[in-house]
Image: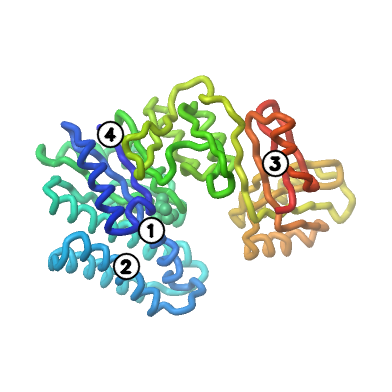
């Protein structure tokens, strides 16, 4: 079996959906194609603002926008289709009831988040399954809340692999022989007691990887708006190079450093099974794209750049002039773990410990507040963390472009630098 994943940008308008359906139809296999889809366009961002407890401007206007957007796409795809309109309206009503039933307390925020935000994927896949069936492609809509079994760690559900494997293989085994497409939601899952969970922002790639692993799929293809795995984000870089072949480990490293082309958790499950992952463009679907698999090195060999913006560098000094030793570090890491702050780069000396993290002001101010009891804290914000794999000195010089370097770390293959943005 093959698994396809389509992200929000590939289904963000009626025209995009037609293109996506065309790609699906031109890749039919004797076995059903498993298709994983995200919410349409920027729907997840919109739904985040409707979560009870989230700071929001005008919920009524946002709710209308959500409805108009999806009903508009549905109506262009199949004008005046009462059944499709009723399905979308029904989901919107369920969403309203869900929002009304939740209590807006800070402790229930993560739970609320998953119950609400999951509607983006539920609505997109409902429209797509209906449309594909309308076109004559026999499509089964599968509920990922019943397939991807997770614990109740809301916003970052942890997968129960055994249960997920059983459910997924069970679904495929019981699917009618005439079924051509099994279409399901990315990003969402469910707990054993029936509560919706999500797998973390941009988690649909991971969903595709989980399903591919459980089904022992032949391959995964992620359809994107870029021609493949590029050596830098084209938003920040004008002459990017497409990497044709990427070893699994390299892809994991790159995702870890912040390459946004695939979700960091995606590669591990398929690496374990030796399943290749293809990244192809939904804009030029006949072009070759990139493939992640059992390779020794990247090809072509070229420097790879990863930029993380909006970084803050915290320098932490013990108040009693004790050394920065294991006991102090344990306290600091305990706080980071409690607040769910991920360290992007760290360095220690005898009297200080420096960490570079994404600057989420709510979290970093709480961290600084907590540290103050035992430590003096100095910080620099508005920074950029640059990672260069396969660096050369001229490459570093041209990227730094004369900016002062606040911190630098170099290993055999990787150079990391913190500079003012
Ligand atoms: N819709 C979700 C998000 O935007 C999941 C995804 O797109 O992968 O984060
Ligand atoms: Mg997305």
* Numbered disc 2: secondary structure: helix
Q: Distance between the Cα atoms at labels 2 and 3?
A: 41 Å
Mark 4 vs mark 3: which is more N-terminal? 4
Q: Badge 2 is on which residue?
A: 69
Residue positioned most to the top:
296
Q: Which mark lies nearer to you, 2 or 3?
A: 3
Q: Distance between the Cα atoms at labels 2 and 4?
A: 31 Å
Q: Distance between the Cα atoms at labels 4 and 3?
A: 40 Å
Label of residue 52 in the image:
none
In the picture, residue 71 is in which quadrant? bottom left
Label of residue 41 in the image:
1
Q: Residues within 10 Å of mark 3 (few under 14, many from 20)?
A: some
Residue positioned most to the right:
321
Q: Position of residue 217 (x, y in %)?
A: 30, 31
Mark 2 vs mark 4: which is more N-terminal? 4
Mark 3 vs mark 1: which is more N-terminal? 1
* Numbered disc 1: secondary structure: loop
Q: Is residue 168 left or right of 413 when viewed as pictured?
A: left
Check the image and report above or below for 300 versus 81.
above
* Numbered disc 4: secondary structure: strand
Q: Badge 3 is on which residue?
A: 399
* Numbered disc 3: secondary structure: helix
Q: Position of residue 45 (x, y in %)?
A: 44, 63
Label 3 C-beta lies within 8 Å of the nearest ligand 2 atom = no
Q: Which mark lies nearer to you, 2 or 4?
A: 2
Q: Is residue 227 left or right of 4 when viewed as pictured?
A: right
In the picture, residue 374 is in which quadrant? bottom right
Q: What is the quadrant of the N terminus in the image?
A: top left
Q: Is residue 179 left or right of 217 when viewed as pictured?
A: left
Asked whether the beta carbons under mark 2 and mark 1 sit within 8 Å of each other, the answer is: yes
For image coordinates 32% across by 49% down, the residue present is: 37
């Amino acid at each position: 079996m093959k698994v396809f994943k389509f992200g929000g940008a590939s289904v963000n308008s009626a025209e995009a959906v037609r293109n996506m359906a065309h790609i699906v139809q031109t890749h039919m296999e004797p076995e059903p194609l498993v298709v994983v889809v995200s919410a349409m366009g920027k729907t997840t961002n919109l739904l985040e603002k409707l979560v009870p407890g989230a700071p929001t401007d005008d919920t009524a206007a946002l709710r209308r926008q959500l409805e108009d957007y999806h009903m508009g796409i549905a109506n262009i795809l199949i004008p005046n289709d009462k059944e499709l309109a009723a399905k979308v309206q029904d989901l919107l009503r369920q969403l309203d009831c869900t929002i009304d039933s939740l209590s807006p307390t800070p402790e229930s925020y993560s739970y609320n988040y998953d119950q609400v935000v999951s509607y983006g994927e539920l609505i997109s896949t409902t429209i797509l399954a209906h449309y594909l069936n309308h076109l004559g492609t026999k499509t089964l809509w599968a509920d990922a809340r019943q397939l991807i079994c997770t614990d109740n760690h809301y916003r970052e559900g942890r997968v129960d692999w055994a249960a997920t494997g059983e459910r997924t293989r069970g679904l495929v085994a019981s699917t009618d022989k005439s079924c051509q497409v099994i279409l399901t939601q990315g990003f969402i899952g469910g707990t054993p007691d029936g509560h919706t969970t999500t797998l973390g922002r941009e988690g649909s790639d991971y969903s595709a990887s989980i399903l591919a692993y459980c089904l022992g799929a032949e391959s995964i293809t992620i359809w994107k708006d870029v021609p493949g795995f590029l050596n830098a984000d084209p938003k920040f870089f004008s002459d990017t190079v497409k990497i044709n072949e990427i070893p699994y480990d390299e892809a994991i490293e790159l995702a870890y450093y912040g390459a946004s082309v695939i979700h960091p958790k995606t590669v591990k499950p398929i690496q374990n099974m030796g399943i290749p992952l293809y990244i192809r463009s939904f804009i030029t679907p006949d072009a070759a794209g990139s493939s992640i698999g059992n390779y020794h090195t990247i090809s072509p060999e070229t420097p790879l750049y990863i930029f993380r913006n909006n970084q803050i560098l915290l320098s932490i000094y013990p108040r009693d002039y004790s050394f920065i030793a294991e006991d102090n570090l344990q306290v600091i890491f305990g706080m980071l773990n409690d607040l769910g702050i991920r360290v992007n780069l760290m360095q220690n000396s005898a009297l200080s410990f420096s960490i570079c993290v994404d600057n989420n002001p709510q979290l970093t101010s709480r961290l600084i507040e907590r540290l103050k009891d035992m430590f003096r804290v100095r910080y620099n914000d508005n920074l950029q963390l640059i990672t260069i794999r396969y660096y050369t000195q001229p490459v570093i010089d041209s990227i730094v472009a004369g900016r002062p370097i606040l911190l630098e770390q170099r290993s055999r293959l990787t150079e990391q630098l913190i500079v003012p943005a």
